[in-house]
Image (cartoon, rainbow, N blue to C red):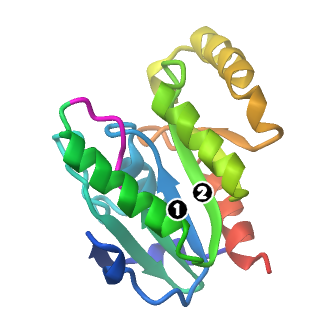
Amino acid sequence: MLPFHAAAFESAAGRLDQLPQPNAPEIAFSGRSNVGKSSLINKVLNRKSLARISATPGKTVTINFYSLPGARLVDLPGYGYAKSSQSEKARWSGLVEGYFNAGRPLRLVVQLIDMRHPPTADDLGMLDYLLQTGAPFLVALTKCDKLNKTQRAQRRASLEEDLAFCGSVPIVEFSAVKGDGVEELRGLFSEAAQAV
């Protein structure tokens, strides 16, 4: 198991020439603004505020890198925030696509989707992109604690249908509040980082 407690903020890249040296297996986190990426990263690392949680969606416009012995976690900027200008969206797209095309040692992409809602067009576009690039990925369904047992089962069934085109990718229900899915994600991340 990776030593998640030993994670530290490494750097933030607002341009592709600022990406750190690709010298460790990388696990990247992708999702729309406000889906809970920072909360998931903090919970998995068992840290309160290592990943910065922004009150304003669309604020993370850098790729943030967190290092731990044996791996690196990569927080990609959130997409789909309605108030972002066209130039900001283009910058986001260039940065994220540039990251994916940079030949980095990417072992896993964690695609976050809010469990309470159907995937957005942006979510589906991102999943399609991951399938096309052949990047290994899993889907984390965030905010599952906001649903009762019946709603959770209904949303899970509905989402499995929505995501059927992804094949047999792992789908993990996650709650930053109650800790659902944390151990499962840690196991999957450790496995991915150690895969040759």
Left or right of residue 70: residue 30: left
Which residue in the protein does label 1 denote? 28
Which residue in the protein does label 2 denote? 109
Dot 2 alpha-carbon crowd within 10 angstroms: few under 14, some 14 to 19, many 20 or more: many
**Labels 1 & 2 near each other (Cβ < 8 A):** yes
Left or right of residue 9: residue 112: right
**Which residue sits at x=38%, y=52%?**
93
**Which residue sits at x=31%, y=61%?**
51
SS category of the residue bearing label 2: strand
**Which residue sits at x=40%, y=85%?**
20
Q: Is residue 137 magenta?
A: no
Q: In the rendered image, is residue 70 in sight?
A: yes
Dominant secondary structure (helix, strand or loop) of the stretch shown in magenta:
loop
Number of labelled discs?
A: 2
Left or right of residue 165: residue 176: left
Q: Position of residue 13 (x, y in %)?
A: 30, 73
Which segment is the magenta one? 77-82
Amino acid carrying mark 2 in the image: Val
Corner quadrant of residue 63 = bottom left
The answer to whether residue 76 is above or below residue 70 is: above
